[in-house]
Amino acid sequence: MKLLITSGMRNAAIDVEAAKDHQVVLCGTQWARDPTAPLTMGLILELTRNIGRENARTHAGEPLQKFVGIEIEGRTLGVIGLGKLGGKVSKLAQAFGMNVIAWSPNLTPERCKEVGVTYATKEDLFKSADIVTVHVVLSPRSRGLVGREDLARMKPGAYLVNTARGPIVDENALLETLQQKKIAGAAVDVFSVEPLPADHPFRKLDNMVLTPHLGFATEDSFRNHYTQMVEGIDAWFKGDPLRKLN
């Protein structure tokens, strides 16, 4: 192996130092846009309006609605991580009329002011948010960032959304919280083991929306990344690798 190209500019599954030691050139691709933010809002709408459930019931011949949703306008969204993606989700939520608060280990009130959201402590965010959404990068520091005590602080009618990385949320604690119906529900697009095992207990919960890591999966995204990969191969053959990561 001489060349390795990954989608995106980081990949925790690749041993960068090992690639360097074996003189393998490691390159990445850049995002034109990140489609995860709209997916996050879609999951929020599914949790609160049961769109997929009612779609399935209508296709099955059921005459009228069964599930009563809630309105997100005027409710509070707690954003964990206010980087590029968290900031985009905040703007989309505000367009829906939501109040937005934010927290992360390194977040400052100044950054919140830039985005136009309210700074909160971790404890206050989980206590007051109607919906909590996770948008931090997985690292040793963020692994298990959302734990049992945090979930216990959430209101009985609150929801959790995770489109970041599975291990950021304590999955065992989330499972127990949902089984005991201590919160209204959760929507999860990412898991500690992917694909999600067929016998995973998450699959048996009726208060959980599950999607198979759809955050990046759009035609536009695939076309963008694979075009750059071909460009990267061509550039490597010419002796001038693009977007080197090592």
Image (cartoon, rainbow, N blue to C red):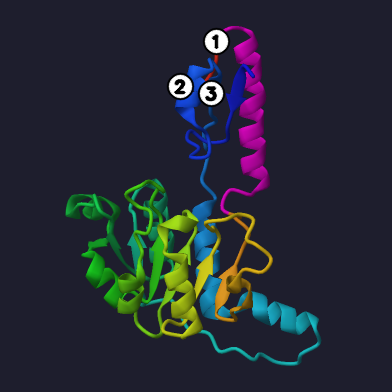
**Pointer 3: what residue?**
26
Q: Nearer the viewer, residue 52 or 182?
A: 182
Q: Nearer the viewer, residue 194 or 32?
A: 194
Quarter holding residue 113: bottom left
Pointer 1 and pointer 3: residues touching (CB < 8 Å)?
Answer: no
What kind of element bears circle 1?
loop
- The boundaries of the magenta stretch are 215-240
Front-lying residue, 139 or 87: 139
Query: How far is disc 1 from disc 2 in space, using C-alphas?
Result: 14 Å
- Comparing marks 1 and 2, which lies closer to the viewer? 2
* Residue named by callout 1: 240
Give me the C-alpha separation between circle 1 and circle 3: 12 Å
Which class describes the residues within 10 Å of circle 1: few (<14), some (14-19), or many (20+)?
few
Q: Position of residue 48 (x, y in %)?
A: 51, 78
Which of the two discs, 1 and 3, sits closer to the camera?
A: 3
Q: Quick check: 111 above or below 20?
A: below
Image quarter where the N terminus lies is top right
Q: Are marks 3 and 2 in contact (CB under 8 Å)?
A: yes
Mark with earlier residue (3, 2): 3
Q: Which is more N-terminal, label 3 or label 1?
A: 3
66 or 244, nearer to the observer: 244
Image location of residue 52, percent across then percent down: 66, 75
Can residue 63 be seen at all in this image of the molecule? yes
Going from the N terminus, do you reach mark 1 or mark 2 first? 1
Give the residue at mark 2. Answer: 246
Q: Amino acid at mark 2?
A: Asn
- The residue drawn where x is 47% and y is 66% is 171
Q: Which mark is residue 224?
A: none
